[in-house]
Image (spheres, rainbow, N blue to C red):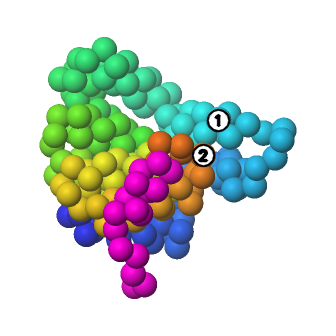
Amino acid sequence: MVNDVLKLVLSGAERRPSPVMSRRLDALFRALQTPTDDRDPEDIQAMIWALWCEHHDPDATRALSRAIDAMVAGRLVVAEGVLDRTVLRWPDFAEAWNRRATLYYMQERDQESLGDIRTALELEPRHFGAICGFGQICMRRGDRTAALAAFETALRLNPYLANVRQMVEALAEDLPRTVN
């Protein structure tokens, strides 16, 4: 499963997002790559996350919001139930898959998390949150090379992830660089 997800991470630039993803995301991702004084990268990131959390069906958006609230409150069983129903009813909702992957990661259910990360990335190959989640699973498993590849990919998509940049710097110091 790790290798399958790693292939998705590394091939993301070659794949297009699902047609249900907002086209406004394209402009926001371009804006992250071309910094200007009039657009704060934090605002751009917040807009990306807001669009990822929206679905064309308002019921899906509300369900995701309930799941996130339950996760924040530590009510993981409730959150899991809501997310299970959400991905079943709206299988095209990348952020619902990503949030359930996060929930599974929190519960150390890495195989299930990897499966949901894979689905999220199939729908939205630019999902730097899901890619970072994959990197965290790789770190927990001791696969520092795959973690570095994931974190570097996330930074190419969003160069303003300060914590991820620190992880890349730390991992790059420890790992020999080879040309593949």
Secondary structure of the residue carrying numbered label 2: loop
Residue 81: where, in percent of width, then height?
21, 27
Q: Quadrant of residue 178?
A: bottom left
Instruction: Note whether 175 is above or below 41 in the view shown.
Output: below
Residue under the point 56% across and 60% down: 156
Residue in the foreground of this view, choosing between 114 and 179: 179
Residue type indicated by callout 1: Glu
Magenta span contains residue 174? yes
| Mark 1: few/some/many CA within 10 Å (<14, 14-19, 20+) | few
Is residue 18 in view from this perspective? Answer: no
Residue 168: where, in percent of width, then height?
44, 56
The span picked out in magenta is 165-180
37 on left or right of 117: right
Secondary structure of the residue carrying numbered label 1: helix
Q: Residue furthest top?
A: 73
Is residue 174 in view from this perspective? Answer: yes
- Rounded to the nearest angstrom, the CA distance separating label 1 from label 2 is 8 Å
Residue under the point 40% across and 76% down: 177
Residue type indicated by callout 2: Tyr
Residue 42: where, in percent of width, then height?
65, 35
Q: Quadrant of residue 70?
A: top left
Where residue 160 is drawn, which disc sits there? 2
Q: Which residue is mark 1?
A: 42
Q: Main secondary structure of the magenta part?
A: helix
